[in-house]
Amino acid sequence: MNTTNNIDSNIIVIGAGIGGLALALALHKVGVPCRVIESAPEIKPLGVGINLLPHAIAALDRLGVVQDLERRAVPTREVCFYTRHGQLVNKELRGRFAGYPLPQLSIHRADLHQVLLDAVRARLGADAVELGRRCTGVSQDTQSVSVHVQDADKNPLPAIRGSVAVACDGVHSVVRKQMHPVEAVPRYEGTTQYRGTTYWKPFLSGASMVYLGTQKTGKLVLYPVRNNVDPQGRQLLNWVVEIERPDEMLLRDWNRPASVEAFIDNFKNCRFDWLDIPAVMRAAESIYEYPMVDQDPLPFWSQGRVTLLGDAAHPMMPRGSNGAAQAIIDALTLADLLVTRDDPVSTLKVYEARRLEATGKVVLANREISPDAILRVVEERTGDKPFDKIEDVLSEQEFELWQARYRAVAGFDKTHVQAAAAEPR
Ligand SMILES: Cc1cc2nc3c(=O)[nH]c(=O)nc-3n(C[C@H](O)[C@H](O)[C@H](O)COP(=O)(O)OP(=O)(O)OC[C@H]3O[C@@H](n4cnc5c(N)ncnc54)[C@H](O)[C@@H]3O)c2cc1C
């Protein structure tokens, strides 16, 4: 891409979350300089677990960070689907265990973030991520874009000029609000999510992900994200509860603390021979709550020299393991386009054309056909009662078709991942 002499840096990346750091690495890999600004004055180990599906791993592999991730993560072996009575509906192998060329990884968000941050600092320079720099808006002319910035005390700083600005500033993106002043109201599903982590001994295969129950009575997603955290060989378990709370739409704050009493009653009978779930919940290190909110796909997300990426572009419900995955794939797609094309304005439109519809489908799929939504079907067919034989309720073929549909929409069907894994590093 051409540079303009008086431009401070070529690409300005706004936000050093998962998507912004992946973009910085992807741009560096193709030789495009960038400047990364982040509003937080320091990077803290925040969040709980994230499951990285093989399509995200294919993208991260191109960024050369998968070995570092594998050292910290747990390679997901299988996903098991249970009713709230503890009856197994079905299970499927995942990642390499399912014949994919790449693993599926369960990882703490803080570990994923740290691996990306370390790689950015090692490759782009120790001060490549400028902390305590909050973007307050963008302006542009035909030659350049200016990102307006405040420091951590809200003092204005000189605007940063570049040829392109990419807003990776998360669910509350200021750039998205500027681009779409009359934005659609966030859509609340009527469900609150509680997320926690607990040190516990390995359960099932030691690398199993469990979906149990439905939002109506309390749904649980559970998987280990760190191995051997102490001499007893315990793991760090990540667990997420979703419960219908139609009258309570919380603020979208990833760090809002919650109490186990808000949901523990719903799981009091979930003491199984493979895991005592209430005991795991009570032993949590910390618990957070978050509303299940998304937004209808935007009509556009590139305007002149400015575009959106990750949650800023397509806020989706944290379900189906796709928030981080889609942000990382956005980053690779955009970097590949920026290096091969000269005109930034048309390049950002091509990026939008490649990613807006694709990610919009994932946003919508997470509402209805996420992998675990099959448990709703079982609940309806059994009247929420224990079944005698699962074959009388749901066939193997129906289960597989359901899962295949989500894999295809989200882009992690085996053929797709094999093709992505075969791309030049
Ligand atoms: C603190 C935190 C905890 C999270 N915990 C979880 C979790 O437990 N489970 C889960 O599934 N997802 C979690 N997420 C969301 C998850 O990281 C994203 O859904 C996904 O990875 C997509 O990444 P993203 O880069 O688009 O957004 P994010 O990872 O949210 O990154 C956005 C970044 O932009 C920065 N930023 C925001 N506004 C500005 C601004 N005006 N100027 C400059 N920088 C700005 C933010 O500080 C943040 O670093 C969390 C996000 C955050 C920020």
Image (spheres, grey):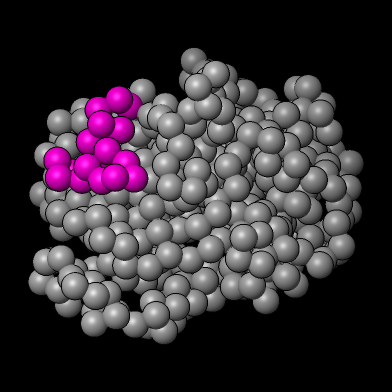
Residue 68 counted in the magenta span? no
Residue drawn at point x = 65 percent, y = 55 percent: 103
Residue drawn at point x = 68 percent, y = 41 percent: 70
Q: Is residue 99 left or right of residue 87?
A: right
Image quarter of residue 42? top right
Residue drawn at point x = 64 percent, y = 48 percent: 166
Whole-percent x, y for residue 354 in the image: 64, 71
In the depicted structure, whether residue 261 falls above or below residue 66: above
Q: Is residue 268 left or right of residue 371?
A: left
Whole-percent x, y for residue 250 in the image: 23, 41
Image quarter of residue 125? top right
Quadrant where the C terminus lies? bottom right
Q: Main secondary structure of the magenta part?
A: loop
Q: Nearer the viewer, residue 316 or 77?
A: 77
Whole-percent x, y for residue 193 in the image: 28, 45
In the depicted structure, whether residue 213 falls above or below residue 75: below
Q: Is residue 24 left or right of residue 51?
A: right
Q: Nearer the viewer, residue 225 or 183?
A: 225
Per the rendered image, the range of residues in magenta is 267-284
Q: Is residue 302 left or right of residue 267?
A: right
Q: Nearer the viewer, residue 4 or 18?
A: 18
Quadrant where the N terminus lies? bottom right
- Can residue 327 be seen from the camera position used here? no
